[in-house]
Amino acid sequence: MPTGGHAHSGGVEAAVTDGSLASLTDLAAFLLGRLHTAGLVAAAFAAATCHAIATGRTDVAELDAELDARTPAPAQRAASRAQGRTLLRAGRAAWPVPAGPRAPHHPIALGMVAAGAGLLPADAALAAAHTTVTGPATAATRLIGLDPLAVTGVLAGLADDVEATARAGEEAAALPPRELPALTGVRLDLLAEQHRLAALRMFTS
């Protein structure tokens, strides 16, 4: 979908700039860490949003506020909301996406679009976990010239972890918003702020 995800590196550009991501091995470790922190949170909130819309038990705005509280870096919040806004715009061109926050965080928008498309919370969780690693992997290919086939191999190697993260997100979907996962990727927050202050950037975030 044309959601603008190609403009965001998920911390990869800043990691490449500071020298901590320079190889396939570095990329695999980076993606695994991102998946087990930000990925789990994204999967849980996407699934919870889809579940909330289906059951009407929770206000989507409350979920968005809880996710905002779990996103301490201003640069991360801005990037997430920018992607959420674009995803909603694309989703509403294709499906009857329900009303909600105008510029929600990306996982919230993903849950809203999934609900509008008639998908299940499990589907929303899997999509969130998947995009947590695929976007940054694509950015790494562009930034340091990695072999695209080798990067695809790295992603294939993470398939079980992606599915496990999605299952954990789905299992959390019915929890009260305050009890949803709140894991923090401190390194990702720092990279986001470093990237925001960089004089030269290829990616928005």
Image (cartoon, rainbow, N blue to C red):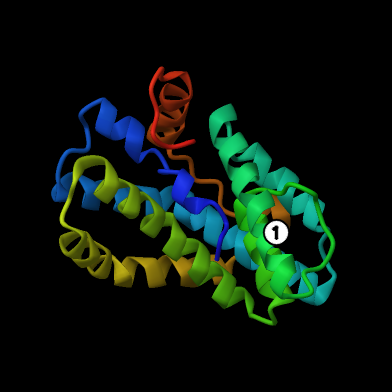
Label 1 crowd bin: few (<14), some (14–19), many (20+), radius 10 Å: many
Give the amino acid at mark 1: Leu
* Front-most of residues 28 and 90: 90
**Above-or-below relation of 148 to 163:** above
**Quarter of the rendering occupied by the N terminus:** bottom right
**Above-or-below relation of 104 to 176:** above
**Above-or-below relation of 41 to 165:** above
Residue 23: which quarter of the image?
Answer: top left
Answer yes or no: is residue 96 visible.
Answer: yes
Answer yes or no: is residue 48 visible.
Answer: no
**Above-or-below relation of 152 to 132:** below
Where does residue 27 sit, x and y in percent of width and height? 23, 48
In this rendering, position of residue 9 left or right of residue 183: left
Residue occupying image coordinates x 34% and y 35%:
13
Pointer 1 residue:
88
Residue occupying image coordinates x 82% and y 67%:
98
Residue occupying image coordinates x 70% and y 74%:
94
In this rendering, position of residue 126 left or right of residue 176: left
Residue 47: which quarter of the image?
Answer: bottom right
Where does residue 109 sit, x and y in percent of width and height? 67, 58
* Front-most of residues 35 and 144: 144
Residue occupying image coordinates x 43% and y 37%:
203
Residue 74: which quarter of the image?
Answer: top right
Where does residue 20 sit, x and y in percent of width and height? 22, 32
* SS of the residue under disc 1: helix
